[in-house]
Image (cartoon, grey):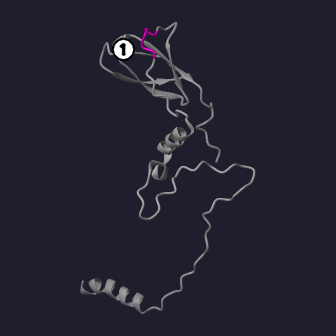
Amino acid sequence: MFAAALRPASFAARAAARPARSAVVRALSTTAARRSEHPPPPQLFGEGAKPGEIPTDLNQSTGLERLQVLGALEGVEVFDLNPLDSSRIGTLADPIKVFSLEPERIVGCTGAPAESHELLWFNLTREKNRRCPECGSVYALDFQGSEHAHEHAH
């Protein structure tokens, strides 16, 4: 039993006595290939603030927030924040159309006229119209996006 306890220590001593092997370093490039036939991707990251300065939204915003800030500089409203038509109740024959660039969207209903019941959220897809369980208003997705936007060819 004593010999079994010493065995791991002897392995460690032998490993320390061996000369160290020189590490082989291999260069690896992670830079994407640049091709002239495609435009450069949009800049999603701000350049940041210079040392000693306080960054602005334009300097430090990224992702969707940066898209919204750049749109505001151009005078374009990137996101439609207007409420849906609540002057009428949507029916199966004439549902309330909800614009979307995605194949599914989350919709909130407050009733018709507006604020006639508590806010209820539900998922709306291209395949199926949805009816509000409280007021019965019917919503349909008005899909305007690309059919194959989420498919990736690898």
For the N terminus, which image quadrant? bottom left
Determine the secondary structure under disc 1: loop
Residue in view at x 51 percent, y 38 percent: 72
In the displayed structure image, the side of residue 20 where residue 110 appears, left or right: left
Name the residue located 52 percent from the left edge and 32 percent from the top edge. 77
Residue 73, percent from left and from top: 54, 41
Q: Which residues are magenta?
A: 85-90
Q: How many labels, in total?
A: 1
- Which one is in front, 148 or 2? 148
Spot occupied by residue 86 in the image (x, y as percentages of width and height):
42, 13
Magenta stretch, main secondary structure class? loop
Furthest residue toward left: 2
Q: Is the residue 117 above or below the residue 93 in the image?
A: below
Q: Residue 117: give x, y in percent of width and height.
A: 30, 15
Does the stretch in magenta take in 29? no
Does residue 48 lie above or below 97 as drawn?
below
Give the quadrant of residue 15. Answer: bottom left
Three-letter code, disc 1: Ala
What residue lies at 72% left-to-right and 55% top-to-bottom? 35
Decide which of 109, 92 is in the foreground and name it: 109
Residue holding disc 1: 114
Q: Nearer the viewer, residue 17 or 88?
A: 88
80 lies above or below 40: above
Provide residue 124's location: percent of width, then percent of height: 46, 23
**Residue, far front:** 53
Q: Residues within 10 Å of mark 1 (few under 14, many from 20)?
A: some
The vertical placement of 122 against 148, above or below, is: above
